[in-house]
Image: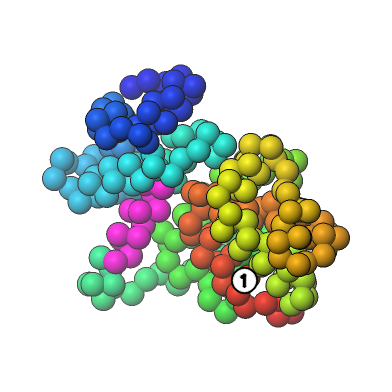
């Protein structure tokens, strides 16, 4: 299994364009896929295990959605595999009617920042696997934010507190997500095109500038690999700031 990061990125980009290259890449990284599956299930998977098939598909999804600006590919793929396995575990438990664990996230380190930025108020994380996915994503997000010189605490302090400013940020995020290349350029240049966003949305550039660090976090979350957190961000942007 290749280990050079540059070689991996080259192979991923080749696999994005060619199905045979994708098949070869997946085959080469089967030990990694098996290892990630074993971490989740607590045992070595057999070839017939559903979890292994899900992990393989998640690895393929990671290939399709990866960009070199999203950090190390294997870490990105690891998050994607775990998220898909968690989704499958949830579905299976619902079918069996198993009651999920109800353990609020408040006892976990970093929960105060989480509640400021992404918590869906009144709905604590009631599944162990979901909390684990959130904390894994937060660890990855923290690492990638450090490159921008931003911490989650910075973003929490910089988050909009009024409905009007939250609405301005929502419009900015919606526009950035709808325009191909804006998030990719942000990942590449580490700069948010605030003037262009302000002109397109009709919002004040000064308002957007005041919340630049918050917008940077949200755009990074929507760049891919943070789907669990994304759900809470979407709800926050839809609901307005109720404080």
Instruction: Determine if the magenta segment contains residue 82.
Output: yes
Please give left or right for residue 5 compared with residue 23 in the image.
right
Of residues 103 and 145, the one nearer the viewer is: 145
Does residue 75 appear anywhere in the picture? no
Of residues 232 and 182, the one nearer the viewer is: 182
Against 23, is 97 above or below? below
Q: Name the image colouring.
A: rainbow
Q: Position of residue 53 (x, y in %)?
A: 22, 46
Q: Position of residue 224 (x, y in %)?
A: 51, 49
Q: Identify the residue at image location x=62%, y=48%.
A: 182
Q: Quadrant of the N terminus?
A: top left
Please give left or right for residue 199 compared with residue 229 in the image.
right
Instruction: Determine if the magenta segment contains residue 153.
Output: no
Residue 62, picture quadrant: top left
Please give left or right for residue 25 compared with residue 131 in the image.
left
Residue 146, picture quadrant: top right
Q: Quadrant of the C terminus?
A: bottom right
Q: Which residue is mark 1?
A: 236
Q: Identify the residue at image location x=46%, y=40%.
A: 66
Q: Position of residue 58 (x, y in %)?
A: 33, 46
Name, please, the residue furthest toward the right. Answer: 206
Residue 153, picture quadrant: bottom right
Q: Position of residue 15 (x, y in %)?
A: 34, 32
Against 71, is 214 above or below? below
Does residue 101 appear anywhere in the picture? yes
Q: Identify the residue at image location x=17%, y=41%.
A: 46
- Neighbour tally class for label 1: few under 14, some 14-19, many 20 plus, Cα within 10 Å: some
Magenta-drawn segment: 80-91
Of residues 99 and 75, the one nearer the viewer is: 75
Give the dominant element type of the magenta stretch: helix, strand or loop. helix
Q: Identify the residue at image location x=60%, y=74%.
A: 238
């Amino acid at each position: 299994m290749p280990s050079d990061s540059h070689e991996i990125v080259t192979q991923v980009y080749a696999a994005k364009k060619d199905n045979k290259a994708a098949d070869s890449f997946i085959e080469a990284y089967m030990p990694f896929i098996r290892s990630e599956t074993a971490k989740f299930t607590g045992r070595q998977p057999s070839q017939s295990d559903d979890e292994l098939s899900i992990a393989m598909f998640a690895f393929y999804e990671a290939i399709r959605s990866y960009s070199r600006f999203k950090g190390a590919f294997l870490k990105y793929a690891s998050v994607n595999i775990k998220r898909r396995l968690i989704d499958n575990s949830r579905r299976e438990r619902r079918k069996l009617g198993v009651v999920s664990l109800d353990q609020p996230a408040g006892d976990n380190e970093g929960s105060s920042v989480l509640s400021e930025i992404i918590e869906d108020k009144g709905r604590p994380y009631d599944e162990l696997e979901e909390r684990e996915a959130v904390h894994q994503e937060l660890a990855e997000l923290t690492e990638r934010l450090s490159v921008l010189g931003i911490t989650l605490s910075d973003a929490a302090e910089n988050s909009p507190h009024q409905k009007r400013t939250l609405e301005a940020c929502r419009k900015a995020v919606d526009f950035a997500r709808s325009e191909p290349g804006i998030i990719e350029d942000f990942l590449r240049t580490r700069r948010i095109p605030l003037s262009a966003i302000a002109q397109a949305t009709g919002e004040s550039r000064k308002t957007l500038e005041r919340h630049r660090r918050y917008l940077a976090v949200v755009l990074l979350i929507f760049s891919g690999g943070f789907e669990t957190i994304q759900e809470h961000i979407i709800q926050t942007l839809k609901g307005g700031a109720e404080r």
